Image (cartoon, rainbow, N blue to C red):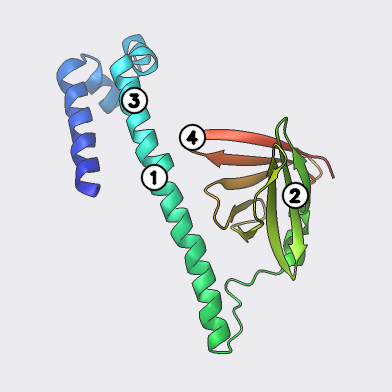
Amino acid sequence: MNNEWKTQSISNVKNLSESKNWFSKWLNTYQFPEEAYDYFINDPYYLNQVSFHSIILFDNLLPNTQRIRNRSIQVHRKISIYFHQEDTLLNYPVDQYKHYLGSYQSETVSIRIENRDNKLYFIWTEKDFNYPPAEIFPISKTCFTAMDNNGFYYLRLDANNNVVKLVDSYAGRKDEYIKIE
């Protein structure tokens, strides 16, 4: 995949350099002529290339990378338990993430984040269907991933550092959920 990706990228740059008069000005001076804006916004072939790269990146590479990360965390935990060692690297103190807890809502989806046995879980309900709870793996105070879920989540805070929204970022789209409790 890497070679194919490189070949495609080189081909795209070569095509621009051979077919667009503004290419060198854009590349060397970072000046963006009107023709460049028109091309990047309206050209159907360019937009097809963007869609192709989005599918490869957001629907394949990133979710698989995230899945590997989440599984690695689980394996690391099991190894720590097996060797009777405290896992201070991955066993996050839940009380530092209590601001994650609560219910979030959109028009069609309900999300609940709760503490179960000193671990955070993400519960997703859509159209009266409850997905299995997924353990949350915090990345920072406001960002996390969830096991068996391909989204990357972050919390929006107000001026007082209270959580007001949960944002699900996946495959180039962002869905927002209002915190209701």
How many marks on residues? 4
- Is residue 104 shown above or below 91? above
Q: Is residue 89 above or below residue 166?
A: below
Q: Secondary structure at mark 4?
A: loop
Q: Nearer the viewer, residue 86 or 161?
A: 86
| Mark closer to the chain start, 1 or 4 | 1
Q: Where does label 2 land, which residue?
A: 112
Instruction: Kindly indicate whether the residue at mark 4 contacts the one at mark 1 (C-beta within 8 angstroms).
Output: no
Numbered tag placed on residue 172 in the rendering: 4
Q: CA distance from mark 2 to mark 1?
A: 27 Å
What's the residue type where badge 3 is placed?
Tyr
Q: Position of residue 12 (x, y in %)?
A: 22, 29
Residue beneath disc 3: 30
* Circle on res. 60: 1
Q: Earlier in the sequence, mark 2 or mark 1?
A: 1
Q: Amino acid at mark 2?
A: Arg
| Amino acid type, residue under disc 1 in the picture | Asn
Amino acid type, callout 4 = Gly
- Crowd tier of the residue under label 2, counting other residues whose Cα lies within 10 Å: few below 14, some 14–19, many 20 or above: some
Task: Kindly check if marks 4 and 2 are in contact, taking CB atoms under 8 A apart as contact.
Answer: no
Could you tell whether 176 is left or right of 23 in the image? right
Mark 4 or 2, nearer chain start: 2
Disc 3 versus disc 1: nearer the observer: 1
Q: Nearer the viewer, residue 21 or 143?
A: 143
Q: CA distance from mark 3 to mark 1?
A: 31 Å
The residue lying at 66 percent from left, 50 percent from top is 142
Q: Quadrant of residue 50?
A: top left
Q: Earlier in the sequence, mark 3 or mark 2?
A: 3
Q: Are marks 3 and 1 in contact (CB under 8 Å)?
A: no
Q: State how far apart marks 4 and 3 are (Cα).
A: 25 Å
